[in-house]
Structures are given as structure tokens and as C-alpha cells.
Image: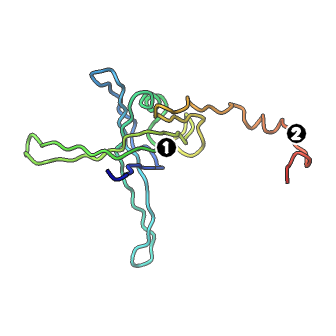
Amino acid sequence: MAKSVNKVILLGNVGKDPEIRSTGGGTMVASFTLATSDRTKDPQGNWQDRTEWHNLKAFGRTAEIVRDYVKKGHKLFVEGRISTSSWDDKESGQKRYRTEIIVNDLSLLSGRDDGGGGASPYSRQSSSTSAMDQRQPAHQDEYAQSAEISDDDIPF
């Protein structure tokens, strides 16, 4: 079989607070939406913003992180894969489709208390070989200011 790739990278804002549930086997599942925007010029030369909404789903430990730290308006960097499911609508009998992004890696770019910019010290990769949560020192700026650097310390 030929090699193939199914990888999605998104940087956007959460549309509403995540919905959390558990499967019959006890696996936690987080469902939420992420908005991304494109800016293009129309034929008259005016800038037009177009927002695309993505349905995301996270499982296990990543879903727990989403539950604990992700809220409406937060900025996220997400890596995942596209998954499309289909079913027959019970009322109309028509075939229905839903495309979702299954989250593999998640980085929180908003602080705990804000819905916008800033960086969060929490990042999670949900693959089996991922590292534990990456946490930066709480007083990183104080540490940087306390380190005395002279011209002799710079290698160039």
C-alpha cells in the first residue's frame, strides 16, 4: 500500500465550553469547536474575513486537560487527524456525515483566567510516546533577571 498522511494543524479560538462525557468503558471524551480565520481580498480590493469552524474530539488524558483548562475563547494550537463518520438519519432516511478532528497534541496558548493571548505553561501530547505535561517555572522572568550575563558569556 502507498504511504499516506492524515495530519491537521490548527491554531484558533475555542467557540464554546467543551462538552465532557465518558464512554461505556470509562474513557473520557471532550467535544468542542475551534474557529480559524482566513483573510482574503474580494474583487473590489476590500479585505474579507472568513471563519471556518472545526469540530474537535479529545480522548483520555487529553480530554481531562481540556476539561480542566479549556474554556470558550481560549486560543489553542492543535495537531490531530481528520475522521469522518456517516449514519442514516432516522427521520428523513438520508445519509448524514460529520467530519471531526481527533486531537493528538494540544497546546494551550491562553492563560488560565483569560480568553485571549498570553502563553500557558501547560502543553499536552496525547500519543503513547508523549512527555508528561510541560510546565515552565512560575517565575521565569525573575529567574532571567537574576542571572547575570556579561559580554564574556556570549559565544559570538
- Picture coordinates of residue 89 (x, y %)? 12, 43
- Of callouts 1 and 2, which one flags the residue occurring earlier in the amino acid sequence? 1
Relative horizontal placement of residue 135, taking residue 52 as reference (left or right) = right
Q: Amino acid at mark 1?
A: Leu
Relative horizontal placement of residue 22, taking residue 92 as reference (left or right) = right
Residue at left offset 44%, top offset 27%: 61
Residue at left offset 81%, top offset 39%: 145
Marker count (numbered)? 2
Q: Say which of 155 and 9 sits in front.
A: 155
Residue lying farthest bottom? 44
Evaluate if marks 1 and 2 touch, with contact meaning CB atoms under 8 Å apart.
no
Q: Quadrant of the C terminus?
A: bottom right
Q: CA distance from mark 1 to mark 2?
A: 34 Å
- Residue of label 1: 76
Dot 2 surroundings within 10 Å: few (below 14), some, or many (20 or more)? few
Badge 1 marks a residue whose secondary structure is strand
Instruction: Determine whether 53 is above or below 63 in the image.
Output: below
Instruction: Determine whether 41 is above or below 68 in the image.
Output: below
- Picture coordinates of residue 119 (x, y %)? 60, 41
Badge 2 marks a residue whose secondary structure is loop
Q: Say which of 136 and 131 sits in front.
A: 131
- Residue of label 2: 148
Q: Amino acid at mark 2?
A: Glu
Dot 1 surroundings within 10 Å: few (below 14), some, or many (20 or more)? many
Residue at left offset 45%, top offset 44%: 79
Relative horizontal placement of residue 143, taking residue 96 as reference (left or right) = right
- Picture coordinates of residue 120 (x, y %)? 58, 37
